[in-house]
Image (spheres, rainbow, N blue to C red):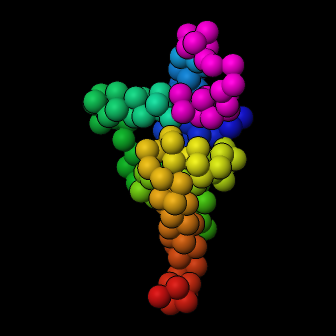
């Protein structure tokens, strides 16, 4: 479940299952070389991250037929009005913030492991997650912008 949630946050709902399958295919191939004392969950999350990023890169190089583009933003499934869908808002965060939130809060990984996946320090991973949560709070409740300034 953790791996699928990580895939969803990186590639979105439509491509998450493809990334999830690629993750486990890669994991099965690499499993014989996995050290006995390895943290399997962190290892799988790392593979999910890499496969998801690969999928984003590969899909970004493929043209989208004009017929598949929506006429209006509402056709993407987001309801109009003031309702905020937290998953859409998280998906709009900068990549480091989005990934730090996904790995720590959804994946349950400590910031030390999040930092290893993202390539940085635990403090930087904690800051990225904190900045992401702050941005979400301000987006959902603009009145908090004044409180945090």
Please name the residue shown 57% across and 12% down the image.
33
- Magenta stretch contains residue 69: no
Q: Residue at x 67, y 31 (%)?
A: 39
Residue drawn at the location 53% of the way across and 28% of the way down: 47
Q: Is residue 44 above or below residue 36?
A: below
Residue 32 within the segment the image draws in magenta:
yes
Q: Quadrant of residue 16?
A: top right
**Count of numbered badges drawn on the protein:** 0
Query: 89 or 70, which is in the foreground?
Result: 89
Residue 135 in view here: yes
Residue 68: image x %, image y %? 38, 35
Part of the protein shown in magenta = 28-47
In the foreground, 88 or 81 = 88
Asked if residue 50 lies left or right of residue 126, the reply is left
Q: Which residue is located at x 56 percent, y 84 percent?
A: 144
- Where's residue 71, x and y in %? 38, 49
Asked whether residue 73 appears in the rendered view, the answer is no
Relative depth, front residue between 66 and 30: 30
- Screen quadrant of the N terminus: top right
Seen in the picture, residue 90 relative to 33 is either above or below; the reply is: below
Q: Main secondary structure of the magenta part?
A: helix
In the rendered image, residue 6, in percent from the top left (x then y), is placed at: 59, 40
Depth check, front residue: 1 or 45: 45
| Left or right: where 31 falls relative to 145 | right
Horizontal relation, residue 101 to residue 105: left or right: left
**Picture quarter containing residue 37?**
top right
Q: Position of residue 99 (x, y in %)?
A: 51, 49
Q: From what the image shows, is residue 102 above or below residue 66?
A: below
């Amino acid at each position: 479940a953790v791996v699928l949630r990580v895939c969803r946050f990186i590639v979105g709902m439509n491509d998450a299952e493809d990334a999830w399958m690629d993750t486990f295919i890669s994991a099965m191939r690499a499993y014989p070389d996995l050290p006995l004392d390895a943290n399997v969950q962190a290892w799988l999350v790392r593979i999910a991250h890499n496969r998801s990023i690969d999928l984003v890169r590969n899909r970004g190089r493929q043209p989208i037929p004009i017929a598949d583009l929506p006429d209006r933003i509402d056709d993407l499934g987001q309801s109009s009005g003031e309702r905020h869908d937290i998953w859409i808002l998280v998906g709009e965060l900068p990549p480091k913030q989005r990934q730090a939130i996904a790995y720590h809060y959804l994946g349950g990984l400590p910031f030390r492991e999040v930092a290893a996946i993202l390539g940085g320090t635990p403090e930087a991973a904690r800051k990225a997650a904190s900045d992401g949560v702050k941005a979400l709070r301000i987006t959902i409740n603009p009145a908090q912008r004044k409180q945090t300034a």
